[in-house]
Amino acid sequence: MSLDRPVLAQEVYHRSFGHGPQAVFAVHCSLAHTGAWRGLAAALGADRVTLQGFDLLSHGKSPDWDGQGILQMRNAEAGLVLLEAQVAAAKGRAVDLLGHSFGATVALAMAQARPDLVRSLTLIEPVLFAAAGGLDPAALAQMRADHERVRAPYAAGDVEQATRLFNRAWGTGHPKWPDLPESARAAMMRSFPAVMDCDGQVYDDEAGLLAPGRLEALTMPVLLLQGAETQPIMASVTRALAARMPTARVAVIDGAGHMVPVTHAAETATLLTDFWAKTGRARAREHSRDQVG
């Protein structure tokens, strides 16, 4: 699917953390906003990285999605405008791209559309459930069944209960829903209809991110990161993606669940720093070989 658009349909809110020389672009998870990256950015080091992110449509300070197109791709379009500007500001140097959960699927779409802008790609708990279908169809079927417990109250008009159940399954586990500030609950409920509209994108790959040859064509270094205590289907998703991505490596953080970059920011930062260092050394070797050749 083409991401070419003469004019961006909806502008998104964006901001940066840190002021370091390494350029990082990050896409947050559903029901969150760019503030979710604050802890990881601090752990990476404000003097080492400049981490830029944007609020997904219907999230944070970005406008509500206008209902046009596929939301996954609309977010990718918005992200690419910012990524292009970040690369230009870095004098053409490609950026380290990462995404978490649904944001990881958006980051994947961005990397597929403009691999030339991406030095490395990190997918943290990518909820592209469709990937698990061929490897573990039972896990996908169970995930669909589990999701019906969220969809049922949503279809009945109880957005708060549906949001609460979704947050219970995929959130940090604390604070509990009743203990969250009213503003936080309201923000999640505002975002939730857009989240539900993405079911076809994560369960059925409506955008074609998993089409033959799409994953195999990504040649930049790829890190697939997950929490050891996450939802069962995520291990199958990770294995399925790794099997098709030629440069992928997998890392698992013990004791972490789905919200690993938030709950285990220090451990995530350590893995990313090591991954990026190896990426830099590999690129240096390639450059040296090109010079000799």
Image (tube, grey):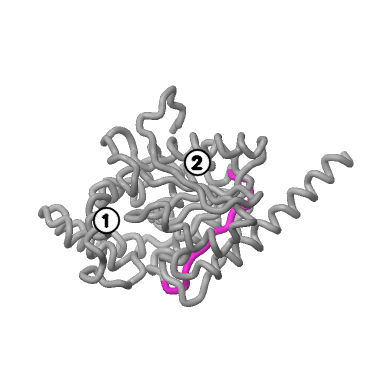
Which residue position is annotated with label 1?
188
- In the visual, does 267 lie left or right of 259? right
SS at badge 1: helix
Crowd band around label 2 with a 10 angstrom C-alpha radius: few (<14), some (14–19), many (20+): many
Q: Which percent across, then down, holds residue 77?
A: 44, 35
Gap between marks 1 and 2 measured at Cα? 25 Å
Task: Pick out the residue farthest to the left.
Answer: 156
Q: Which percent across, then down, holds residue 9?
A: 36, 29
Q: Can residue 134 be seen in this snapshot?
A: no
Q: Residue at x 70, y 58 (%)?
A: 278
SS at badge 2: helix
225 inside magenta stretch: yes
Closer to viewer: mark 1 or mark 2: 1
Which residue position is annotated with label 2?
110
Residue type (three-letter) at the residue carrying disc 2:
Met
Q: Which percent across, then down, holds residue 132?
A: 42, 58
Magenta segment boundaries in residue numbering = 218-229
Q: Residue at x 75, y 54 (%)?
A: 281
* Location of residue 234 (image quadrant): bottom left
